[in-house]
Image (cartoon, rainbow, N blue to C red):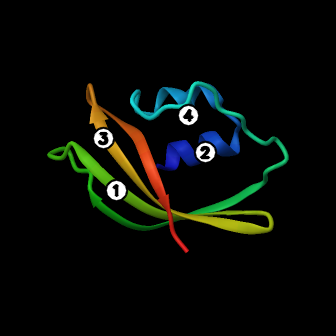
Amino acid sequence: MRSRYSAFVKLERDYLLRTWHLRTRPGALELDPAMRWTGLEILDTTDGSAFHTTATVTFRASFRGGSLHERSRFERVDGAWVYVDGEFLD
């Protein structure tokens, strides 16, 4: 999760697509260079240890003028965690 947040901050489109599950990955990803991310707060996690194949991360990512609150789902594919999808919260 933290690495994907950093990739959004640094506009690293290739990394974001590479760490997105094949079944839900978009064909293209447009990032807004004017977006200024200002912080990440991990609020909750479930599973995600070396013994799990799925995990969720609930977080709040702040940006200039607001924040994004999401519960993200991840799956382990070939030993690596990949983003599946997310549910926006409040």
Q: Residue furthest bottom?
A: 90
Q: Which mark is residue 16?
A: 4
- Along the polypeptide, which appears first: circle 4 or circle 1? 4
**Residue 25 x/y as whole percent:** 49, 31
Query: What residue sits 51% from the left and 69% below the top?
Result: 89
Q: Nearer the viewer, mark 2 or mark 3?
A: 3
Label pair 4/2, CB-CB below 8 angstroms: no
Please, what secondary structure does the residue beneath circle 2 have?
A: helix
Label 1, on which residue? 56
- Neighbour tally class for label 1: few under 14, some 14-19, many 20 plus, Cα within 10 Å: many
- Along the polypeptide, which appears first: circle 1 or circle 3? 1
Amino acid carrying label 4: it is Leu
- Along the polypeptide, which appears first: circle 4 or circle 2? 2
Please, what secondary structure does the residue beneath circle 3 have?
A: strand
Label 3, on which residue? 75
Disc 2 from disc 3: Cα separation: 19 Å
Q: Which mark is residue 26?
A: none
- Along the polypeptide, which appears first: circle 3 or circle 4? 4
Please, what secondary structure does the residue beneath circle 1 have?
A: strand
Q: How many marks?
A: 4
Amino acid carrying label 2: it is Ser
Q: Nearer the viewer, mark 1 or mark 2?
A: 1
Left or right of 3? Residue 34 is: right
Left or right of 66? Residue 5 is: left
Amino acid carrying label 1: it is Thr
Say which quadrant the C terminus sits in: bottom right
- Neighbour tally class for label 2: few under 14, some 14-19, many 20 plus, Cα within 10 Å: some
- Along the polypeptide, which appears first: circle 2 or circle 3? 2
Left or right of 15? Residue 54 is: left
Please, what secondary structure does the residue beneath circle 4 have?
A: helix
Amino acid carrying label 3: it is Glu
